[in-house]
Image (cartoon, grey):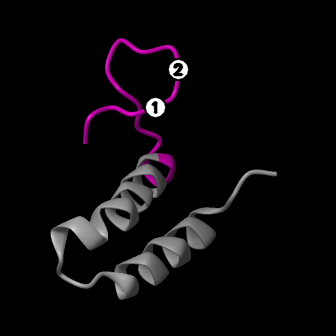
Amino acid sequence: MEETKEQLQKQIDQLNAQLTGDMFADMDIKDQIHNLKMKLNGVKPMDSKIDCVGCGS
């Protein structure tokens, strides 16, 4: 089942609320946010036939 834009945005908002300001503590949360934003915006790396897996962000 595909998630709606509203569901994705809600997950992003919930994760943003968990951020502490400590770069190392927030690293996993920011990675999850990044992945959700890519789903939300339909983005994947240029010249890639697969979705982003560890794109280095």
Q: According to the image, label 1 marks what residue?
A: 53
Give the position of the C terminus as an image quadrant.
top left
Q: Which quarter of the figure has residue 26? A: bottom left
Span of residues in magenta: 39-57
Residue drawn 50% across the image and 14% down it: 49
Amino acid type at image mark 2: Ile
Q: On the rendered structure, is 56 left or right of 4?
A: left
Q: According to the image, label 2 marks what residue?
A: 50
Q: Residues within 10 Å of mark 2 (few under 14, many from 20)?
A: few
Amino acid type at image mark 1: Val
Give how far across and how far down residue 35 sits, in percent: 44, 50
Q: Residues within 10 Å of mark 1 (few under 14, many from 20)?
A: few
* Nearer-the-camera pick, 15 or 2: 15
Q: Which quarter of the figure has residue 34? A: bottom left
Q: Secondary structure at mark 1?
A: loop
Residue drawn 43% across the image and 80% down it: 13
Residue drawn 33% across the image and 32% down it: 55
* Nearer-the-camera pick, 24 or 38: 24
Check if mark 1's residue and mark 2's residue have beta carbons within 8 Å: yes
* In the image, residue 56 lies in the stretch drawn in magenta: yes
Q: Nearer the viewer, mark 1 or mark 2?
A: 1
Give how far across and how far down residue 6 sits, in percent: 58, 72
Q: Secondary structure at mark 2?
A: loop
* In the image, residue 24 lies in the stretch drawn in magenta: no
Residue drawn 35% across the image and 12% down it: 47
Extreme residue toward the right, this view: 1
Instruction: Tell me if residue 40 comes above or below residue 16 in the rendering.
Output: above
Picture disc at residue 20: none
Give how far across and how far down residue 30 sits, in percent: 32, 63
Q: Main secondary structure of the magenta part?
A: loop
